[in-house]
Image (cartoon, helix red, strand yellow):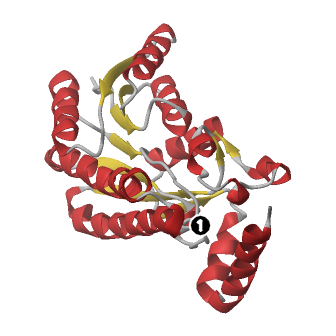
Amino acid sequence: MTQQPVAVITGASAGIGAAAARRFARGGYRVALAARRAERLQALAQAIAQEGGQALPLPTDVRRPDQVQALAHAVLETWGRVDVLVNNAGLGRLAELTALDPEADIRLQVEVNLLGAMWVARAFLPAMQRQRRGVIINVASVAGWVGLPFYTVYAATKFGLRGFTEALRREVADHGIRVVGWYPGPVRTEFGQHAFRDERVRPPKRGRGVALSAEQAAEVLWRLAHHPRRGRVSPWWMSPLVWLNAHFPALSDAVLVRWARRVRAAS
């Protein structure tokens, strides 16, 4: 009998992570839920159980290697395997660099968005290597391809995550492990409630209709888990913007510098 697969999802207390947990549970996975907000994880685990799934809530701060190791130990002790790891924990603090607090904004983003993904991947890799299979999906951002003004630290973490994803993919390929980078544009989650340290940077309401829903994002993760690829940009129309930034940087500079001026000029 084939053993029921296991998915580990960080940042599972809300948004993309919570939607992905429900999607994987509906698809027959046992789901390990990792995030800092224990009460939300417990509520999500109960909701998944009521829908007939299995979920293990494991409060974890991905900034803490000891807690990440405890997460991996609990998952492997309980279920003995890990098939899909979704490195989804992340946050943004968006404003001019000089307006960001060194600890609460700058260090926090680096530790959660970049170091956290490294700690989690490192903790689960030995199990995947023993299995000779597994998929790691690192949730980055289009900001990992295009550096926007006022996104300096956030973009740095996502560019770093893209480099980590590429290098790790090549490092573990011979172990049968697939490493995928996902680079979404805007997604309708709680991200915007906490990210904008400067409200002038917030996208206008008329532009928010282009954002993915959390459920649409979860469907993308489900497909990437079962049809891994090196990387994917979502939604599709973001890909030409990435291409233009790579091939016509002077044009991108002109457009984005002009946008930054308008932001600064806004009252």
Rendered-image quadrant of the C terminus: bottom right
Rendered-image quadrant of the N terminus: top left
Could you say where residue 19 lies in the image, as x and y percent from the top left? Answer: 55, 31
In-front residue for pair 63/219:
63
Could you say where residue 230 lies in the image, as x and y percent from the top left? Answer: 44, 64
Could you say where residue 71 lies in the image, as x and y percent from the top left? Answer: 22, 33
User: As drawn, is 82 to the left or to the right of 248?
Assistant: left
User: As drawn, is 123 to the left or to the right of 186?
Assistant: left
User: As drawn, is 102 to the left or to the right of 44?
Assistant: left
Q: Residue at x 57, y 49 (%)?
A: 195
User: How many C-alpha atoms fall within 10 Å of the one at disc 1: few (<14), some, or many (≥20)?
Assistant: many
Question: Considering only vertical position in the picture, is 206 above or below 98?
Answer: above
Could you say where residue 6 lies in the image, as x and y percent from the top left? Answer: 32, 31
Q: Which of the 4 image quarters holds residue 257?
A: bottom right
Question: Considering only vertical position in the picture, is 66 above or below 98?
Answer: above
The amino acid at mark 1 is Phe
User: As drawn, is 133 to the left or to the right of 109?
Assistant: left
Is residue 20 visible in this depiction of the protein? yes
**Element on which disc 1 rests:** loop
Farthest residue to the right: give it: 206
Q: Residue at x 38, y 38 (%)?
A: 10
Which residue in the protein does label 1 denote? 150
Q: Which of the 4 image quarters holds residue 29?
A: top left
Q: Residue at x 51, y 23 (%)?
A: 26
In-front residue for pair 105/154:
105
Q: Residue at x 20, y 22 (%)?
A: 78
